[in-house]
Image: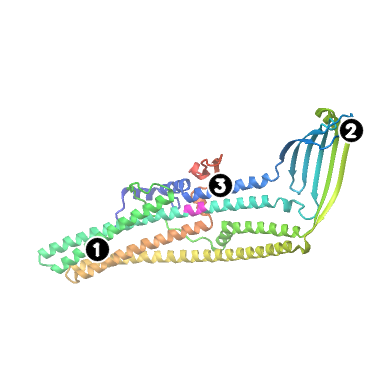
Amino acid sequence: MLRLPFLAILVWLVSPAGATPPRLQEAVARALENNFDVRLNGFDYARTEVNIERAEANFDPTLSSSINYQERQSPGSQTDQSGNSSPSRESVNGGFRVNKRTGLGTQITLSTDASYSSFSEDTEASLGIDVRQPLLGGAGKTVNLANVFRAKVRNESALLTYRGQVLDTIQGTVNAYWNLSFEQERMRLMESSLELAENLLRENERRMELGLATDLEVLQAQASLATRRQALLDAELNIETAHDELRRLQGDDILLDYPEIALAMPAEIPSLPEVSEWYQQVILRDFELRTIENSLAILERDREVARRNLLPRVDLSLNGRALGRDSGTFGAYDAAIERNGYSWGAGISVSMPWGRRQSKADARLAVLELRKESTRRERAEYDKRLLARQVLRDFRAALAQLEISNEQVALQQRLFERERASYRAGVEPFRSVLQAQRALDNAQMDRISNLRRVIRQDTLRARLDHKLFNAFNVSWDISPQLTQFSELGSTSTLHSDRAKNPKL
């Protein structure tokens, strides 16, 4: 008869069928909050968000200004406009510019300039605009926004990777939790087996006192007891190892003492899903396949950019300026605003590398990379379907083996009781009792191992179709939230919605 602690029995009885044990909910919540891999993936996601800002920053206006002073001493004599001799002269010029690049490839420059020369004693000022627009190569949003597109797609892939890590962490925590539960159950079986061995030893000692047993039978009972003590010690070590694995996933201090907790066994046996529908869910929801599809989108854009770069570079340029001149700087600008003078111009420039060998090579390389990634996508989907098929096959086999092991335990229990009764009646030797006890122990261990295998296969199934999100009330849209990211050298803290609120 298995001995379960009162708390374990209570948790088992109050847990509704299919419900997740509260302690398992707490373990998963703690893992999502403190797990190192989840936190590191959160930082990787934050980096891709920063890369979006960097890509978009290329289209921010650029402000620039300059001022220059020059003095020149002529070797001969010169006269200014008033006829005065001026062997030396001074000049000052400066300006302010705003450059802006658009998603169409347009380069726009707004500028203002002013210059003064002591030779003329006047200030010249101008207000102007310069526009340069590519018409073929380098034109359009496809080419000019390619880096922004790549950054956003990689950001989405990083988010998918983060969510995949969340699923992996939940799966690992669930497996570690149930592994600890199964190890505790194994130890309870070892304690029960040890108690039975002690009873057999005491019974043989009494029988030997009555002349019904021999020294050999007492020695066999003592050896059996020692074997079970060793098995109990191994079970205790396995429990400590299981504790450490659960702590590792939760990010807890490994040096803490092992808590004396009793975890209940699973409240019910999971069942197989509907096969055809489940296969579709696995493929549609797989994060790895969606990440490869994002890579395909980037390569598609790269191929289009390579095709555009095969076109010759034809740029249209336009410029216009309002000119003014006066003895003072402000007066010169007033004159420019009143358009006392002006200038404008237009032009077209054409450039194309001889043979366009590099552009053609880039286009071929883009096509090859796209085909390679498409093939990788096909293989990944094929492997995923194969994995799904294998998971269901192993799940089905584990359920069948669990049913058989339950029957074996019942049969071995009956066989042990009969062998023990036959030994007491003097019909069978004590060796038969020990063999029956070992067979019963092995059958009980096999049942635990098969149940563990069923639970692990069910957890893997829930990992593949993302039902782990629902089981632990984690949002499918979970993403790391950046709470602090200031200057270089500062500490950045990332936490998920699930970590902030375990009820999510």
Out of 257 and 319, give the one closest to the viewer. 319
Among numbered discs 1 and 2, the one appearing first in the sequence? 1
Amino acid type shown at disc 2? Asn
Q: Residue at x 38, y 67 (%)?
A: 404
Residue 219 x, y percent position in the rendering: 17, 66
**Residue 363 position (above or below residue 21):** below
Question: How far separated are the C-alphas under marks 1 and 2?
Answer: 110 Å
Residue under pointer 3: 479
Amino acid type indicated by mark 3: Ser
- Residue 80 is situated, as x and y percent measured from the top left of the image, at 87, 32
The magenta span reads 165-170
Indicate yes or no whether the magenta region holds residue 167.
yes
Front residue (pair 374, 214):
374
- Under circle 2, the secondary element is loop
Label 2 neighbour load within 10 Å: few <14, some 14-19, many 20+: few
**Apparent side of residue 212 relative to residue 494 in the rendered image (left or right):** left
Residue 227 disc label? 1
Q: Circle 2 is placed at which residue position?
A: 340
The image's mark for residue 27 is none
Res 385 seen here:
yes
